[in-house]
Every structure is written in structure tokens, then in C-alpha cells.
Amino acid sequence: MAMRFAHRMEEIRASEIREILKLTEKPGVISFAGGLPAAETFPVAEIGQLSQEILAREGSRALQYSATEGFAPLRRAIAERMNRTRGTAVDADEILITSGSQQGLDMSGKLFLDEGDTVLCESPTYLGAIGAFRPFGPRFVEVPTDDDGMITAELDARLTRHGPVKLIYAIPDFQNPSGRSWSAQRRCEFMEVVARHEVPVIEDAPYAEVRFEKHGLPALKSIDPMSQVIYLGTFSKVFCPGLRIAWIAADPELLRKYVLIKQGTDLHTSTLSQQQVHAYIERFDLDANIARIRETYRRRRDVMLAAMDRSFPPGVRYTRPRGGLFLWVELPEAADARELLERCLEHDVAFVPGGSFFPNGGHENTLRLNFSAMPPERIEEGIERLAQVMKSFLKG
């Protein structure tokens, strides 16, 4: 039978990261390709204990349908935590629980984007956001980015030239893929510009608490007097990604529109998973667990950077992230990271070529490395393999 699909299916493409991960499943491959948290940081025993207690206490209620907005005690706990750790002033009525922050991106596309609308984003930006927005047919305009974040003058110029812009998407904290984090001054300048242009902002903050320095920087939402910022948070990088518990924080009127969209998407996020996360926050020390994650990833970042400093050839540049899960590598301009990956896979080491993180193409001389998933000794071995292949590759 000949089937006729929606035109948007032409814009839906396989995730390059997922396709590469298939190639890394054979034994012996050292993969820097995924964005996987370290599995040894998951509180397996505690989750098992809490699950038994929840089912004994709540019974079938923990397995029943629940409110679209989410489990009320968890929404209150998230609001309290955001206000304490990110400097915001939100309450539970401004929180909607989602099935992962990827769902928040998809629903944002449904809410804001029509075909031909303009989305501004960092250059590079998160591949998952490109994939979530592209089916709605927008035009992506990339804003040049340096070590302090979006370059404000370039942002202002693009908002003027390409206006009216429908949406700005940004990852101010330890960005995926670059690992960069916006400075406090750049955050303030950014909010001044977007306030003048009255454009909504998606602040994607999955890595904000995975910082390696003592103090974090304010969320854009904490310096948002006009309620333009829609904040996406998640427990995936600081707790357990498989539970798929994340949230949107937004102005109540805007949040009601998200609720309507979610009702048509999945009705609500897993009741049991929400109760598991809330019970952990109530019974155990989430801050202590995050501190362990930070120390684990800081040590792995240090090992990776030290190995790169020792072995990478001249002319290769890379970021030195102060948090998160990733760092970014730039090869000499004529090099093609996709060709480099093919050779690296022959030596059982993998990464993600950087071209896919640019919605308008180009920049094929870049690549992303993940340092969270591999133990230190495997990181050292993998970087040495990568460096040896890279030296041969760049010599031609």
C-alpha cells in the first residue's frame, strides 16, 4: 500500500550521535561519542528501597494516571531548588514536569514555530534541539559565539536584520557541544538585548549544576524582568537519566499553553518516576550526590585534558570546560572530522564529528569529545589512540 506522509517527515533525520553509537557497541571500542552520565553515580540501592516503600504506601495510586502538570510535591521541590541554586523566584504553579527535557524542546517547537519562522541559536548548538525544531520548518540563524557566550553585538544585529525573530535557543552553562559557559556580564548583556526586541528565549540548562568551580553563575531566568525566558531543567545529568524526569519553568499563562500541548502528547509523565525522584529528594541528600558527580567528572576532564596536552599535534585547538560533560576540538580548517572518524573506528576509538551541531552546515573540521562516561585509564588510552591517528591523518 502506498502511504502518503506529512511533509515534515522530510525534515526528520536520524540522530548522527545515535548512529555512531551503534558503531561503538563492539567490545574494545573506547567511545567519546555519547553524552552518557557515569552509571556508577546512579543511586541504585536507594532507588530500589524507595520504590518498595512507595508501592507499599501508595499502592495502585503510584501506577495510576495523574495530573498533566505533574506531581505537586515534586513541583514544589523543584521550585525551591531552582530558587536556591539558580537564583530564580518561581513557584510550583510555574513548573510543568516533562518526560525528559527533549520533550520540552519538542513542545516548544509546537508552541512557537510555523514554517519559515526564524530561530536564533548559538554556533554551534545542541544537535537534539536542531532535530526537535527542524520538522516545524523554521529558518535557523546562527549567532557567533566566543568563550564568554553569544556575542551580543552579533545577536543584536541578527535580531534587527532577520526580525521578527520567533525564538532564541541558548545553553548558557557548559554548552553541548562546546563545553563553554557564558560569563556573568554576557548574560546581563544578552537579557538587555532580548528585552529590547521582546523575543522569547529557551534557556536549556541540563548541565548547570555539573560545575567544577565552587560558585555557579545566575540563570538567565533569574535576570528576566519581562518573563521572556522559558527554562528547561532536568534530573538526567545530576541523578538518573532513565527516569526521564525534567521540567519547564515559565510564566503561568505561557505554562498553560504547554500543558495543553502535553495533554495531546502523552497526557502526563510517569507517576511512579516522579514519586521516586521526590522521595529521593526528601529522604536522601541530592546535593551530596551531585557533589560526587562533579568530582568524578572534574577528575575525568583533567585526565582528558592532560592527555590531549601531551599528545595532540600542533595546530589542534580545544576548549577547557569548567563543567558539564563535553569539550570541543577544532582541527586545521582543511581537515574533515568525518574522515578522521572513519580511521579512528579502525583503531577502536570514537567521537562525534562537529558539523552536525551547525544547523546550516559547514565547520567539518570540528569534533566533540565526551569525558563523563569512561574511567580515567580508558580516557588516557583512548586519547592516545585518537592522537596517533590524528597525527597521521593531518600529515596527509
Image (cartoon, grey):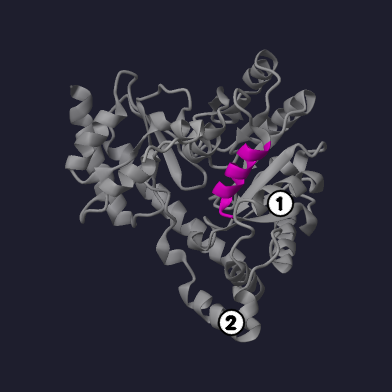
Tell me where residue 40 sits by quadrant: bottom left
**The C terminus lies in which quarter of the figure?**
top left
Which residue is found at the position 67% from the left and 50% from the top?
248
Single out the residue that lies furthest toward the bottom. 56
Give the secondary structure at mark 2.
Answer: helix
Q: Is residue 161 above or below residue 46?
A: above
Mark in the foreground, 2 or 1: 1
- Magenta span: 99-111
Dot 1 crowding, Cα within 10 Å, few <14, some 14–19, many 20+ = many
Report the residue marked by disc 2: 55
Q: Position of residue 144 (x, y in %)?
A: 55, 22
Most common secondary structure along the magenta stretch: helix
Which residue is found at the position 63% from the left and 39% from the top?
110
Which residue is found at the position 29% from the left and 34% from the top?
312
Which residue is found at the position 22% from the left and 38% from the top?
344
Give the secondary structure at mark 1.
Answer: helix
* In the foreground, 181 or 58: 58
Q: Position of residue 280 (x, y in %)?
A: 60, 72
Report the residue marked by disc 1: 259
Q: Is residue 55 above or below residue 13?
A: below
